[in-house]
Image (cartoon, rainbow, N blue to C red):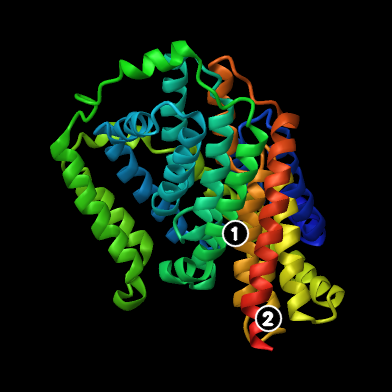
């Protein structure tokens, strides 16, 4: 019976692998079952059915991505213990002197910068927590600020290797360094951020006001005592600075960014209770990635991704410029419909296969990064950060509706992709003619 099953699977492994992958995708979009459970079940079935051997399955896991995420989560969780995030939020509120527009823009800027150098999922959790706390104290609707922070986190995270999970995956697969991302994408991201902020101020123009009660509450805020552990904060900032320096020079030292991040996290755990920090690591995200890598490995093994890359090449008639912009827009639209992490994991092997047709595919990597990260703003399920913040807002009694977010996020995504298209064309094609 078992032999017959294995014979059947071997005979129809292309159909079975693709069906399994599409089912997992469907359940991720459906959101009724935790996506980590769905991906682990799917990857387990891929192994049990013999599509992949256990050795092959573990070979498809990108441990550089996994360990980088774990290391950054550890460091950010330790910084959280110091009270630095709360201090920053209340300090910003006082500096903006009760001007709701400037507060929203300041929170957006803090979120974008922090997302670039920490990671956008962790950053947006802390910024959203602070925003919800402020909203409760001032008795204001937090939704304009939370939606702005979601959008800012996805935009800011686009500019660096560690800012957004898709970039971590792209950097590891393509051998791109921290400085490659920084120098190739930051100028695009800054312009996208400015355009997005202008649009958000216009969209929320009627909501960005504090009444007299809120203004009175602002006058009672004291910064003293918000920093709970100054010594740990100094230690954390020193270690984080060294880690960021390590990221920027890893192409010279030849240390993987995952090694640098994990070592930084380990050093900081010398100053805190390790068990508490381990408990705060988002293990759901880590195991979701593990399951996802195995599933993508299954469809890659049966040749599906080779077929897709060949079709893309045929569709664009080998025109590299057209292929680049097709990658940007397909990535942007697809990432608005489904989570940008599984989309990126699926698309990376497609670009690797397209490398057989072109001398260089560097622009395709930038197109995928911009499309996947910026496209994450297109809907509430476009990126992990979106879902987390929406859940937090709902618990406060201010639900962010799917359609409401779509109207705002869709406009921002369209504008972001247009700006990206223009700058990519100008920089990589027009100036090189």
Mark 1 residue crowding within 10 angstroms, few (<14) / some (14–19) / many (20+): some
Q: Which residue is at the far left?
A: 231
Q: Which residue is mark 1?
A: 53
Q: Earlier in the sequence, mark 2 or mark 1?
A: 1
Which of the numbered marks, if any, corresponds to residue 429? 2
- In this rendering, the answer to whether 413 lies above or below 307 is above
Is residue 89 shown left or right of residue 124? left
**15 or 157, nearer to the observer:** 157
Which numbered disc, 2 or 1, marks the residue closer to the eye?
Answer: 2
Mark 2 residue crowding within 10 angstroms, few (<14) / some (14–19) / many (20+): few
**22 or 69, nearer to the observer:** 69
CB within 8 Å, label 2 to label 1: no
Relative image position of residue 206 (x, y in whole percent):
64, 26
Relative image position of residue 359 (x, y in whole percent):
64, 87
Is residue 5 shown left or right of residue 380? right
**113 or 101, nearer to the observer:** 101
Q: Residue at x 33, y 18 (%)?
A: 219
Is residue 278 shown left or right of residue 381? left
Give the mark count.
Answer: 2
Is residue 71 shown left or right of residue 119? left
Relative image position of residue 77 (x, y in whole percent):
33, 38
Question: Quadrant of the rendered structure where residue 96 is?
Answer: top left
- In this rendering, the answer to whether 168 lies above or below 98 is below
Q: Residue at x 62, y 39 (%)?
A: 200
Which of the numbered marks, if any, corresponds to residue 433? none
Quarter of the figure with the C terminus:
bottom right
Look at the numbered disc 2 and give the secondary structure of its residue.
Answer: helix
Look at the numbered disc 1 and give the secondary structure of its residue.
Answer: loop
* Residue 423 in view (yes/no): yes
Q: What distance separates the C-alpha of mark 2 from that of mark 1?
A: 43 Å
Relative image position of residue 166 (x, y in whole percent):
56, 56
* Residue 3 in view (yes/no): no
């Amino acid at each position: 019976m078992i032999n017959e099953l294995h014979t059947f699977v071997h005979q129809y492994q292309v159909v079975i692998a693709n069906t399994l992958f599409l089912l997992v995708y469907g359940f991720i979009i459906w959101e009724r079952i935790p996506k980590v459970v769905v991906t682990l079940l799917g990857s387990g079935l891929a192994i049990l059915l013999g599509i992949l051997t256990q050795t092959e399955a573990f070979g498809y896991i990108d441990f550089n991505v996994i360990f980088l995420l774990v290391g950054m989560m550890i460091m950010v969780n330790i910084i959280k213990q110091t009270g630095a995030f709360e201090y920053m939020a209340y300090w910003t509120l006082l500096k903006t002197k009760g001007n709701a527009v400037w507060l929203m823009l300041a929170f957006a800027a803090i979120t974008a910068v922090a997302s670039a150098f920490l990671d956008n999922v962790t950053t947006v959790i802390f910024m959203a927590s602070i925003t919800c706390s402020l909203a409760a104290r001032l008795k204001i609707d937090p939704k304009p600020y939370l939606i702005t922070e979601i959008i800012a986190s996805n935009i800011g995270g686009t500019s660096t290797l560690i800012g957004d999970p898709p970039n971590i995956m792209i950097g590891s697969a393509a051998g791109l360094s921290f400085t490659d991302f920084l120098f190739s994408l930051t100028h695009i991201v800054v312009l996208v951020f400015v355009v997005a902020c202008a649009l958000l101020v216009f969209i929320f123009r009627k909501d960005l006001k504090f009444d007299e009660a809120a203004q009175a509450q602002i006058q009672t805020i004291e910064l003293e005592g918000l920093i709970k552990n100054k010594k740990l904060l100094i230690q954390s900032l020193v270690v984080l600075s060294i880690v960021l320096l390590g990221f920027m020079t890893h192409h010279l030292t030849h240390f993987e960014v995952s090694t640098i991040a994990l070592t930084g996290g380990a050093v900081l755990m010398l100053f805190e209770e390790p068990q508490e920090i381990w408990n705060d690591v988002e293990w759901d995200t880590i195991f979701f990635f593990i399951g996802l890598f195995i599933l993508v490995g299954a469809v890659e093994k049966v040749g599906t991704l080779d077929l897709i890359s060949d079709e893309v090449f045929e569709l664009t008639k080998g025109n590299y410029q057209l292929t680049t912009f097709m990658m940007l827009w397909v990535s942007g639209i697809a990432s608005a419909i489904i989570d940008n992490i599984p989309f990126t994991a699926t698309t990376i092997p497609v670009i690797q296969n397209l490398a057989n047709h072109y001398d260089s595919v560097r622009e395709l990597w930038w197109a995928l990064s911009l499309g996947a990260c910026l496209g994450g703003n297109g809907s509430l399920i476009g990126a992990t950060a979106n879902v987390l913040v929406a859940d937090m807002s709902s618990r406060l009694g201010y639900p962010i509706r799917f359609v409401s977010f779509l109207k705002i996020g869709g406009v921002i995504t369209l504008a972001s992709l247009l700006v990206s298209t223009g700058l990519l064309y100008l920089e990589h094609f027009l100036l090189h003619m």
